[in-house]
Image: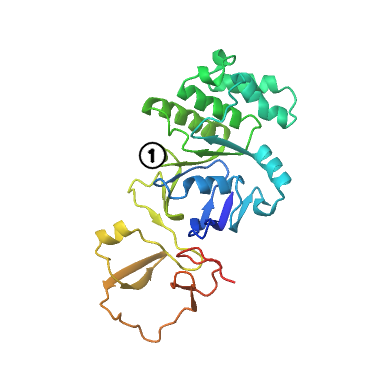
Amino acid sequence: MAAHDVFKIYEGKEQRTDVVALRGVNVELHAGEFVSIIGPSGSGKTTLISVLGGLIRPTAGTIFIRGTTITTLPTSQLVQFRREHLGFVFQISNLVPMLTLQENVMLPMKVAGKKDPKKRTLELLSAVGLTERRKHKPSQLSGGELQRAAIACALANDPEILLGDEITGELDTTTSQEVMDYLKDLNQEQGLAMLVVTHNEQIASQANRILRIKDGSVLTQRLREDTSAEELYEISVKGRITIPEELRRQVGLERLVQFRISSEGDHLKLYPSSVKSPPIVAEEPIKPVEKTCPACSQTVPQQVIYCIHCGHKFN
């Protein structure tokens, strides 16, 4: 799965300001990888997982899954693609309340026209430890059982990718870990690729790779194996880098600064120095081609389609 320069803008009603939920997001998920996306409430996590899974259309950008550009698929084909390749687990269980657990797990297989769905259902219920509860309805299950049942439903059609939105958000610590242990077993033993969004640091830390999102932008990523716990700050193909305000404050970069850059082997080193207003101008500077956004009056690179500050679409 790969997403390139994805924007999602919700148009304001009755002349209210548009809401920019995603700002040029770039995300990749490799086969068999477990990636978590962490961020505070309102950072764009749920919108991102919904856009990546084809549940909602992005305003701009491209999403590829298994070589298919899902952003251009007609709705009927997109529904079929989701059914065959993706599984979803949400914070709030989406089980059908009047059906038994067994019937709920069989339902997506029946819709997909799978043969012998009962056999597959019993295998899944056994795997999540719910065989003895198969005749119970959702209202008779505990929170942990509901989430394990939701995972069984998500795996019914044997997807290559599992997308989770705050899977453990409503669970206690012990039950949360039980659910995560099961998901990690699926990832490690069956090679199921997983992308899980959460606001919980402890849950996020169990992934192979951790992305941090804020205000609709993915700011950093860190590998779990990186014992130094230093996060990797991505430079986009257009040469842009976003350094969080907290980190800038820690190293005293609260004003306009310039950087001297030197290279040592395959490393780049940046040496910041505070710049007083007006800033020092380097000799023969290369001035970027920019334009002014008519909505927020901020300057942006000439080639962008959407304003990186407010999301306004240029003609």
Badge 1 marks a residue whose secondary structure is loop
Please name whichever residue, 144 or 312, is drawn nearer the observer in this view of the structure. Answer: 312
Q: Position of 258 compared to 75: left or right?
A: left
- Residue pictured at 41% horizontal, 40% vertical: 204
Q: Report the residue at 25% width, 77% height from top.
A: 276
- Depth check, front residue: 73 or 137: 137
Q: Position of residue 170 (x, y in %)?
A: 43, 31
Q: Is residue 134 above or below residue 143?
A: above
Disc 1 crowd rating (10 Å Cα; few below 14, some 14-19, many 20+) is: some
Q: Quadrant of residue 257?
A: bottom left
User: Left or right: where does residue 275 sit relative to residue 45?
Assistant: left
Q: Amino acid at mark 1?
A: Asn
| Residue that appears at 72% across and 27% down | 110
Q: Is residue 30 visible?
A: no
Q: Is residue 234 visible?
A: yes
Name the outermost residue toward the front. Answer: 14
Q: Is residue 286 left or right of residue 50?
A: left
Instruction: Find residue 156 and report its horizontal and vertical position in percent.
Output: 64, 29
Q: Which residue is mark 1?
A: 200
Taking depth in this image into account, of 119 and 223 the one nearest to the observer is 119
Q: Residue 121, located in which quarter of the rendered image?
A: top right
**Number of callouts:** 1
Task: Report x, y in % for residue 222.
Answer: 41, 49
The colour scheme of the drawn protein is rainbow
Give the quadrant of the C terminus.
Answer: bottom right
